[in-house]
Image: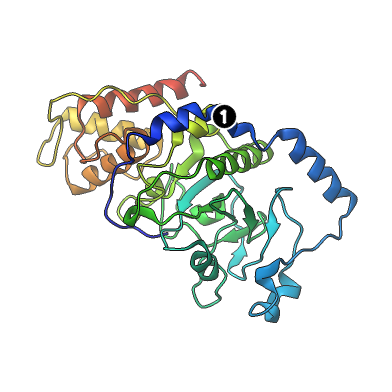
Amino acid sequence: MSALAPALLAASAKPAIRKAKRRFVIIARPQVRRRRAQLRARPNLRRIGAHGKASQNCYARRMTFAPDYPLARVIPSPNHGERLRPISLLILHYTGMPTASSALDLLRSPQAEVSAHYFVEEDGGVLQLVPEARRAWHAGKSFWAGETDVNSASIGVEIAHPGHDDPRPYPLQQIAAVAALARDICERRAIARERVLAHSDIAVTRKIDPGEFFPWEALALEGVGHYVAPARLGAEEGLTIGDAGAEVAALQEALRAYGYDIAPTGRYDEATANVVAAFQRHFRPQRIDGRADASTRATLEGLLGGLRKGA
């Protein structure tokens, strides 16, 4: 949601994530299957939750619904509309607010006109605010692979985190919950791995969440998202603003082929630098400077090569 000054994840957090990668199966698939069976056995189940008792009574009765994800607790938001596209994208956000409760209040305020389908708390609790069949209002003006109505084509997940004001590591139990939720959504909705994206991927000039400190590698270990190990950094400057020619056009074409909103003009302008920075934030987060160095281009080629091979 918020977009503030970027910062890098503390290096010490990475070993902890790797060490804990086997703990990301905390939420086991059999548990999800059992809960789904229980919900099918009680098709009239409706839950509002503690947050839906007072200020939300005016619309809670008509807004209640059974969760699409069996481990979610329903706390409805009125902010949604008709879905106009088949679901083909999963978009991850951070809330970018000091507290989870303030972010949740905003996502459920009729005046705010913003929402997401899911909200993942720091302790790993999962809340569902909007039915997946409905169009939540989380993406804003955005683009991916020709799609301009990303809200209609996507499911949005807000992850409680203060954002770039406090770029602390995401809690392990929260990432475990995000991975389990995302895996369930992608399996049910047949969302391709390369279409699990950051808000910053689809709105490169407006958003920087969930941040370069979000552990995409940890999700990939659980089968969520498209990931290759970033190529090693070098000392060369690479392509940058002011450059022009066939090499720039080839870079732009590659970024567009992956899905980014960029035209192959052959000129390395500010728009190109913004897209490169967005790519780096997700896929090569060690250095985010908008320069297309050899590491950035090799990482991009690795991702495209994986798509060509069907990986």
**Residue 144, image x and y in percent?**
43, 45
The residue that appears at 13% across and 26% down in the rendered structure is: 236
Amino acid at pointer 1: Gly
The residue that appears at 33% across and 53% down in the rendered structure is: 164
Q: Is residue 56 visible?
A: yes
- From the viewer's perspective, tell me whether residue 219 is left or right of residue 259: right
**Residue 82, image x and y in percent?**
62, 63
> Which of 255/47 is in front?
47
The quadrant where residue 177 appears: top right
> Which of 267/271 is in front?
271
Quarter of the image with the N terminus in it: bottom left
**Residue 194, image x and y in percent?**
49, 34
Q: Secondary structure at mark 1?
A: loop
Q: Residue furthest left?
A: 242
Display coloring: rainbow
What residue would you read off at disc 1?
Answer: 223
The quadrant where residue 244 appears: top left
> Which of 12/3 is in front?
12
Whether 47 is drawn above or below 92: the answer is: below
- From the viewer's perspective, tell me whether residue 29 is left or right of residue 23: right
The residue that appears at 17% across and 45% down in the rendered structure is: 269
The quadrant where residue 49 appears: bottom right
